[in-house]
Image (cartoon, grey):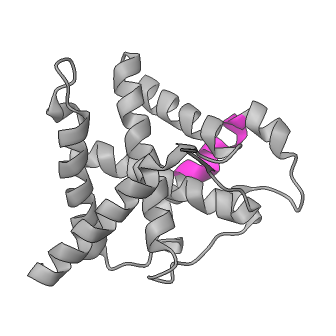
Amino acid sequence: MSRSGRKWLKEVWQAAASAAADMNRLGPLTTPLGNRLVESYAAARSIEGGEIQRALRIALVAGYASRMVLAGPTEQPSLARSDFQLGGHPDLERLAADPDRLIDPVRTIATERLDSVMTLPPEVWSAYVATATMELQGQLTTKTLDWRLFSRERIEEMLRYGYVLRCLDEAIRAEPEHRTS
C-alpha cells in the first residue's frame, strides 16, 4: 500500500477511535444486542472473564464507529429493516429487552454479506483491519490480557459486528448516546 494509502487508513482509524471515545453507548437496541454478540462469541470460543469481554466490546464499538466515519465519505450502501428481519414498525423496546432474535441476522450480514454494506476494495478493508488490530492490541493489552488474545481474525469479527450494528441503527433511525462534558 502506498504511503498516502497508509496515511488515509491511519486518519480513518483515528477518526473512528475518536468517535468511539465520544460514545457513552450504542443505540437503545444495539447496546444490548452488541453485549449479547460478545457474550455468545466468548461462550462459543470458551473465552472466560469479564475483562476479555470488555476488551471485545471495545473492538465492537470501534467497528460501529468505523461505519460512522466511513459510510458517508465512501458512499457505503445502507440496509433496510427487512435485512434484519424486522417489519415496518418493530417494537424496539421489546427487542432491546430480548435482543437474541437479531443475533443471527447480524451475524449473517457480518460474516457472509458484509459486501452488501462494505464496498471498499478487499485490500483496503484488509489493511484497515490490520491497522485496527495493531492499535487495539496496544490499547487492550494488560498484565492479565496478552496481546495474542487479540488476533487479527478476532478483531475483524468484532469490527464487522460493530459495523453491522451501526447499519441496524441507521435502518431503525437510532443514534448512539454521546458523552456529555
Image quadrant of residue 93?
Answer: top right
- Residue at 20% of width from left, 41% of height from top? 137
Is residue 105 part of the magenta span, yes or no?
yes
Q: In the visual, does 81 lie left or right of 52?
A: right
- Residue at 41% of width from left, 18% of height from top? 50
Is residue 152 part of the magenta span, yes or no?
no
Q: Is residue 127 visible?
A: yes
Q: In the visual, does 31 lie left or right of 84?
A: left
The image shows a total of numbered marks equal to 0
Q: In the visual, does 28 lie left or right of 20?
A: right
- Specify the farthest residue to the front: 181
Which region of the structure is painted magenta? 99-107
Q: Is residue 111 visible?
A: no
Q: In the visual, does 32 lie left or right of 82?
A: left
- At which x and y percent is residue 181? 54, 44
- At which x and y percent is residue 35? 55, 33
Most foreground residue, 8 or 45 = 8
- Residue at 49% of width from left, 55% of height from top? 64
- At which x and y percent is residue 37? 53, 37
- At which x and y percent is residue 152? 23, 48
Vertical position of residue 119 compared to residue 161: above or below? below
Image quadrant of residue 99?
Answer: top right
